[in-house]
Image (cartoon, rainbow, N blue to C red):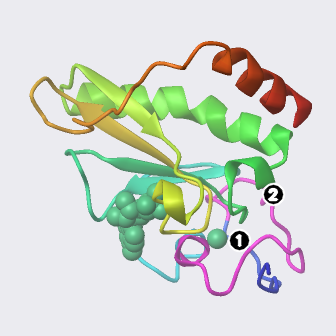
Amino acid sequence: MPKPMVNRKVNPPSNSKPIVEVGSEMSRDDCIFCKMVVGQIPITKIYEDQVVLAFLDIGPISDGHTLVIPKQHFEKLHDCPSEILGQVCSRLGKIAKAVTKAMNSEGYNVLCNNGRIAGQLVEHLHFHIIARNSGDGVFNRWPAYKYEDGKIDAIAAKIRKNL
Ligand code: 5GP
Ligand code: ZN
């Protein structure tokens, strides 16, 4: 069951108009990322605008590991309205480029865990930006396999039916 929402104002970056107004239901009382948005939990900020907040992950898997979150509370990717999701995603490239350049890395992963089984510990939508270098050992296991005959079409049909 979703937890009840609370009314709270989200602090905008100075000299900009807030997108979250007083009295709106866009923030969760029990969410650490919402608390970061309103300044109740300290962060090492990388970037902020009206829509997103980006900060360094406190438990990095590589130097510069950055989290990019919408300021509004959505639990999973598919809970986020497409317009806001588009705005969040439109910031990822710029931030990823900065992380990669600053860390002098050869590449990066953008990762979004959804659901506890997929490794989502914080139930506020977020994108990890993880700088990568050869031999870093990150994501060493990628358990790829091949479909049995006919299975790929059956699975695709099943997914399309759920769109
Ligand atoms: P998830 O596993 O939900 O995809 O990722 C949550 C991330 O949030 C983890 O990588 C974790 O290290 C990070 N995190 C959890 N608590 C804090 C915190 O208080 N401050 C910061 N900066 N990151 C946090
Ligand atoms: Zn939240």
- Graded by Cα atoms within 10 Å as few (under 14), some (14 to 19) or many (20 or more), the crowding at tag 2 reads some
Q: Is the residue marked 2 within 8 Å of ligand 2, measured from its CB?
A: no
Task: State whether the magenta stretch is mostly helix, strand or loop.
Answer: loop
Residue pictured at 55% horizontal, 19% vertical: 148
Q: Position of residue 105 (x, y in %)?
A: 20, 25
Left or right: residue 28 versus residue 146 is right
Residue 156 x/y as whole percent: 75, 22
Q: Mark yes or no: residue 44 visible.
A: no
Tag 1 residue: 10
Quick one: label 1, few (<14), some, or many (20+) residues within 10 Å? many
* Residue 110 belongs to magenta span: no
Kind of residue at disc 2: Ile
User: Residue drawn 29% across and 22% down?
Assistant: 107
Q: Give the magenta part as a residue range.
A: 12-35
Sequence-wise, the earlier of marks 1 and 2 is 1
8, above or below 62, in the image: below
Q: Quadrant of the C terminus?
A: top right
Q: Which mark is residue 19?
A: 2
For the N terminus, give its image quadrant: bottom right
- On the rendered structure, is 1 left or right of 75? right
Asked if the residue under mark 2 is in contact with the one under mark 1, i.e. CB atoms within 8 Å, the reply is yes
Choose top left, top right, bottom left or bottom right for residue 23. bottom right
Instruction: Report x, y in % for residue 131.
Output: 28, 34
Q: Kindly identify the residue that appears in the image at 82 percent across and 86 percent down.
A: 4
156 or 28, which lies in front?
Answer: 156
